Structure formats: structure tokens, C-alpha cells
Image: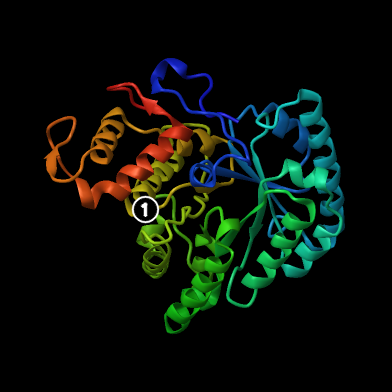
């Protein structure tokens, strides 16, 4: 997979190809705009293999998007899809031809049952699994199943836990719960690709929902919780990638209030340290991923910072300060993201 294949002239450094076997320190940024697709959606194989929306990662969902009575049908559809995708890769002899594919399971029991039907061929097609309602009670069990599958079939697999549980949302239990989640993720660190936040679930605990004219940062109780999650998992010791919550409004019109709202929230995501965003409509993909293209000035400053032994100097445009030691962590992230999203030509806007 490779982003922006039709925009080569816009790049000073083009994005590089990636697949599930790429280095994890780079791959964790590649999830980007993660498109959710219900497991019973029509023509999944065609949509994934043609990839007309330029999705770098997708999640096939068997949780909220599927009725309980349809779970078996969803399982059967997933197995048939993975069989077809395996043959597709085999016939093309190219592991990078597909986006990163994840399966969002419904719960522990659901994951355990699905795992019994999966073969090595299936696991070679997918990058991993998304774990909803991840908490201190479910965390070890989710990752134990994942680790068993990975070891049994000698296949690289990742988990993406979604922190959206009420025990994290409630202030009285939040820090104790985050401590326990942090301990679990440390144990299974090699399997954690990134951490996701369930903004919709958090909001629902209080019966709240943001409007098209506001962002998740305007929902104060949710923003407060997100801040604490960042505080726990974004520190330099662990450097997890934490994705921003889904934006519920969509439109094919880039100038619509729905898309302007997405851009507004996306810029706040990036400013606050989130990377990647769950998306629920193809129109959101391009907007989200283009926000991660590295500006030439940022790339040049990052290189200068990492090549310096210390001290302070002016940035590329001469209008900001680069302080080597405090900005080193930022610079490393910029160069890692540049591998995936490329570096724009000077004065080029995406």
C-alpha cells in the first residue's frame, strides 16, 4: 500500500510503500484514516481490492454495526472474504496490494469463537484486530487470544484497543483504571499498534452528542477524559500512537459544514497529539490523510534538530525557535510520519 499515488508532482519526498510486515515504529502511523466497514456490507471484496477511495487501512466491523442475530452470517462473510483476499494476493504475488485490514470483534467470546475459524492464510491477509470496550477486565483476555493466534501460525498480528469504557469515563475510577490498562499494554507492548478512543461511547454515558458546529473538544467531560488518556499514553517512555475519535458527519462537498467541522476537529486532534482517526464514510478519508502530509518546513526543521548536538537556532522560515533537546521527540515523529505520508513541495498545500 502507498498513499497519494496520483499526486506525485506535489511531493518533495514521496510516501513509501508499507504493509503489515513494515517496521512497527513506522507502521503505527500508517493506520491514518481507518475506514469502518460493516461485515455484512455488500461487495466488500470489490471495494477492498479496487480501493477507489485510497484507504490505507480499513476495519471490518462485527460490533455495533451488526445485529446480534446476524453474527453467524457476519462470521461466514468474513471467512469467505479472507479466503478471496488470500487468493487475490497470491495471484498478484504482492503483499502490499491491499490496505491494512483489521477486524473489530464484538467481545471476548466473539473473538474466541472467530479465532477458531481462522487459518494461517486468513491471518496473512489481516494486520490485526480492534478490541472494543477495552478495560482492565477484558484486556488480558483479548491480547492472550491475539498472542496465541500469532504464535500458533507464526504470523505478525497487532491489536488496537478502544478505550471507551465507563470506568475510564467516570472521574472516580479513571486513574485506577488507566493504571491497570497501562500495565496490561506494557506486557503486550509488541502487539499494540495503536490506541483508539471511543468518543461516541464516552459521550453516550452522559447522553451527549456533539453537533456539526462543535468538536469533541467542546464536550467538556469527554475532552477532560481524553486529556488524561493522552497524559498516560503519549509520554516519551511509551510513545503510543493514539487515534482521534470518529467524526459523525459526512458529505462529498469539501466546502460543506460537515467537512469543515471535520477539518476543524482534525486540526485540534493533531495539535493535541492524536494521530489517525476512525472514519465512517469514504468522503472523510482523503481529508484526514492529507492532514498528515509533512510540510517541507517541518521536515527541514526536524532534520536540523536531529542532526544538531544541542543548542537553539532559527527554524527554516526564520520565524520560530528550534530548541534541540525539547524538540527532539517531535522531530522523530515528523520523520516517521514523512515515511508514510511524504513531504510536500515547498509552498504546496494539501
Vertical placement of 342 versus 309: above or below? above
Residue 251 in view, yes or no: no
Q: Is residue 70 left or right of residue 125?
A: right
Estimate how packed mark 1 is, as few (under 14), some (14 to 19) or many (20 or more) residues with alpha carbons within 10 Å: some
- Furthest toward the front, the residue is 309
**Image coordinates for residue 256, horizontal then vertical, percent:** 43, 36
Q: Residue at x 64, y 72 (%)?
A: 140
Front residue of 255/324: it is: 324
Quadrant of the rendered image containing residue 216 = bottom left
Image x and y of residue 267, in percent: 35, 45
Instruction: Report the residue at 52% width, 77% height from top.
Output: 180
Confirm whether residue 82 shows in the render.
yes
Residue bearing mark 1 = 273
Which residue shows up at 82% across the image and 52% down it? 74
Q: Residue furthest top?
A: 9
Quadrant where the image shows the C terminus = top left
Colour scheme: rainbow
Residue projecting furthest to the bottom = 172
x, y percent for residue 62: 73, 56
- SS of the residue under disc 1: loop
Residue 11 falls left or right of residue 183: left
Q: Is residue 133 above or below residue 191?
A: below
Numbered marks: total: 1
- Picture layout, residue 218 above or below residue 173: above
Question: Residue 248: horizontal and vertical position, in percent?
Answer: 52, 50
Q: Quarter-wise, where is residue 92 in the image? A: top right
For the N terminus, the quadrant is: top right
**Residue at the spot x=65%, y=29% of the render?**
51
Amino acid at each position: 500500500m502507498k498513499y497519494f499515488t496520483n499526486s506525485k508532482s506535489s511531493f518533495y519526498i514521496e510516501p513509501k510503500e508499507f504493509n503489515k510486515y513494515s517496521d512497527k515504529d513506522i507502521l503505527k502511523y500508517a493506520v491514518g484514516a481507518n475506514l469502518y466497514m460493516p461485515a455484512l456490507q455488500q461487495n466488500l471484496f470489490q471495494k477492498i481490492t479496487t480501493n477507489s477511495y485510497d484507504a490505507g487501512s480499513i476495519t471490518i466491523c462485527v460490533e455495533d454495526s451488526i445485529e446480534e442475530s446476524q453474527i453467524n452470517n457476519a462470521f461466514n462473510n468474513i471467512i469467505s472474504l479472507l479466503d478471496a483476499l488470500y487468493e487475490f494476493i497470491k495471484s498478484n504475488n504482492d503483499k502490499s496490494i491491499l490496505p491494512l485490514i483489521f477486524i473489530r470483534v464484538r467481545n471476548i467470546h466473539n473473538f474466541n469463537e472467530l479465532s477458531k475459524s481462522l487459518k494461517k492464510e486468513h491471518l496473512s491477509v489481516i494486520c490485526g484486530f480492534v478490541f472494543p470496550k477495552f478495560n482492565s477486565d477484558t484486556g488480558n483476555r483479548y491480547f492472550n487470544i491475539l498472542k496465541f493466534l500469532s504464535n500458533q501460525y507464526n504470523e505478525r498480528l497487532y491489536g488496537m484497543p478502544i478505550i471507551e469504557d465507563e470506568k475510564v469515563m467516570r472521574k472516580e475510577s479513571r486513574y485506577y483504571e488507566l493504571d491497570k490498562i497501562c500495565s496490561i499494554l506494557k506486557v503486550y507492548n509488541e502487539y499494540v499498534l495503536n490506541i483508539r478512543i471511543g468518543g461516541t461511547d464516552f459521550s453516550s454515558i452522559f447522553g451527549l452528542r456533539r453537533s456539526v458546529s462543535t468538536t469533541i473538544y467542546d464536550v467538556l467531560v469527554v475532552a477532560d477524559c481524553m486529556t488524561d488518556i493522552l497524559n498516560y499514553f503519549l509520554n516519551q517512555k511509551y510513545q503510543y500512537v493514539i487515534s482521534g475519535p470518529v467524526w459523525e458527519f459526512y458529505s462529498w462537498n469539501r466546502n460543506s459544514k460537515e467537512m469543515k467541522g471535520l477539518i476543524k476537529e482534525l486540526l485540534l486532534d493533531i495539535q493535541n497529539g492524536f494521530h489517525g482517526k476512525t472514519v465512517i464514510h469514504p468522503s472523510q478519508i482523503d481529508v484526514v490523510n492529507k492532514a498528515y502530509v509533512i510540510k517541507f518546513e517541518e521536515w527541514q526543521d526536524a532534520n536540523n534538530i536531529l542532526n544538531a548536538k544541542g543548542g537553539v537556532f532559527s527554524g527554516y522560515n526564520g520565524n520560530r525557535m528550534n530548541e534541540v533537546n525539547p524538540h527532539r521527540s517531535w522531530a522523530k515523529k515528523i520523520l516517521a510520519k514523512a515515511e508514510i505520508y511524504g513531504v510536500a513541495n515547498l509552498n504546496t498545500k494539501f
